[in-house]
Image: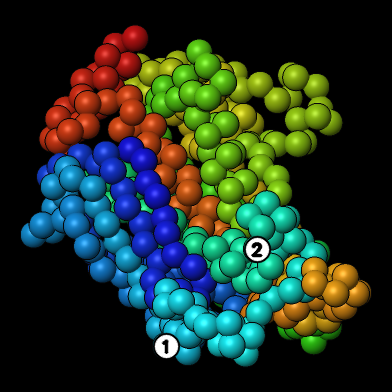
């Protein structure tokens, strides 16, 4: 399975094309739409989330509620494009129109792709960079993830996510999968603890007053993963490495860890390795899950637990210093739309990126032209594992 996304932040639409999905998989479009709406939630989001309703449509690959096996195209219209038609349209402009055009960007924002992208692609208007490097692109990725969740639902593999830190507010208590699912439903910041939720809201409010932004840490949990997804034989077949790359591809993500993560560097091996157990009812299993569901780049059957850290959004309403690329004079950086915190939304994006990688690994490992064949292949594989 592979996918591509296209679209700019203020362009007419964002689009995703997915190739390699099996035929005859039932698709619940309403459930997918709910997943897409989750990305727009979270305390501290800005006015753009009110403008864009992010309702998606299928353009190909689905007929009568089932996949065809052909490429699946999905798209979301940008409702705000009507205000950006001249600025972002595909019609050539005269030199006079170009000189009069508003919203030309010549002052790169620290922490964004503006300057280095302009240098690489030789653009004097940095809007040509920031429009695509915007987190708006994650709309399409969440759509692909929602499609992959339809496959995982059908295979009884469950995924959820939560926020464990926003700024100085931490909710690192261990919860059951069900507690996370239920607790984050009513939380404006996707934390399970009500106390932490209130503290995080207050911190976000203060950051907004200060013209500042906040980062945080998100956690994704996969329950009931198939044993042996990924491989130990090559660096680029290790599934944990693929998940790490996918999470680091999310805007503003700067670090990834599995299970105990970086705490493994503080304790002896006897407190890190997961002892192997066996019972007739459950077969082989691990006594603990310090390694986050992976050994040798392969899933062990224990829950996959992965965390990612998101840096504070670099666009500040009290902007940092920069340099105009035309005049070379120092200026305060350009202010585009910004949220004081987007960590709750980032946890949703992370959840869907993990769903994509798990689905990819399944479709790579098993016969997957037809969903029935896929299910039979997985059942046969699990039967063999049960007899190991």
At x 91%, y 74%, the residue is: 330
Query: Counting other residues with Cα less than 10 Å from the Cα at mark 1, is it few (<14), some (14-19), or many (20 or more)?
Result: few
Residue 123 image label: 2
- Identity of the residue furthest to the right in this view: 330
Instruction: In the rendered view, tell whether residue 17 sits above or below residue 332.
Output: above
Instruction: Compare residues 305 and 7 and report the one nearer the observer.
Output: 7
Q: Residue at x 84, y 31 (%)?
A: 266
Q: How is the image coloured?
A: rainbow
Which dot marks residue 256? none
Q: Helix, strand, or loop for circle 2?
A: loop
Q: Quadrant of the C terminus?
A: top left
Percent position of residue 379, x then y? 22, 26
Closer mark to the observer between disc 2 and disc 1:
2
Q: Is residue 359 visible?
A: no
Q: Quadrant of the N terminus?
A: top left
What residue is shown with label 1? 82
Q: Secondary structure at mark 1?
A: helix
Residue at x-position 44% and y-position 65%: 7
């Amino acid at each position: 399975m592979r996918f591509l996304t296209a679209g700019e932040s203020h362009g007419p639409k964002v689009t995703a094309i997915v190739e390699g999905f099996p035929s005859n998989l039932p698709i619940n479009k309403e459930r997918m739409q709910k997943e897409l709406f989750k990305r727009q939630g979270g305390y501290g989001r800005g006015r753009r989330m009110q403008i864009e309703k992010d309702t998606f449509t299928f353009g190909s690959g689905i007929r009568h509620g089932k996949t065809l096996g052909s490429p699946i195209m999905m798209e979301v219209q940008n409702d705000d494009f009507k205000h950006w038609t001249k600025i972002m349209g595909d019609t050539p402009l005269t030199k006079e129109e170009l000189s009069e055009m508003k919203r030309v960007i010549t002052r790169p924002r620290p922490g964004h792709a503006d300057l280095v992208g302009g240098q690489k692609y030789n653009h004097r208007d940095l809007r040509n960079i920031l429009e695509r490097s915007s987190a708006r692109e994650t709309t399409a990725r969440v759509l692909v993830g929602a499609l992959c969740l339809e496959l995982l639902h059908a295979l009884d593999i469950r995924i959820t996510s939560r926020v464990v830190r926003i700024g100085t507010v931490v909710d690192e208590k261990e919860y059951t999968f069900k507690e996370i699912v239920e607790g984050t439903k009513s939380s404006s910041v996707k934390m399970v603890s009500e106390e932490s939720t209130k503290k995080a809201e207050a911190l976000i409010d203060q950051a907004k007053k200060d013209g500042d932004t906040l980062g945080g840490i998100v956690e994704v949990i996969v329950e009931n993963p198939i044993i042996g997804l990924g491989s130990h034989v090559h660096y680029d077949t290790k599934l944990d490495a693929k998940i790490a790359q996918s999470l680091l591809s999310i805007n503003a993500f700067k670090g990834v860890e599995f299970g105990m993560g970086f705490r493994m560097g503080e304790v002896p091996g006897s407190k890190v390795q997961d002892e192997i157990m066996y019972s007739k009812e459950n077969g082989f299993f691990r006594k603990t899950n310090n390694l986050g569901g992976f050994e040798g780049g392969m899933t062990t059957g224990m829950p996959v637990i992965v965390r990612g850290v998101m840096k504070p959004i670099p666009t500040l309403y009290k902007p940092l210093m920069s340099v105009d690329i035309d005049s070379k004079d120092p200026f305060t950086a350009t202010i585009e739309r910004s949220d004081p915190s987007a960590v709750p939304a980032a946890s949703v994006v992370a959840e869907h990126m993990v769903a994509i990688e798990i689905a990819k690994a399944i479709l790579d490992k098993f016969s997957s032209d037809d969903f029935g064949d896929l299910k039979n292949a997985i059942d046969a594989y699990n039967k063999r594992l049960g007899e190991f």
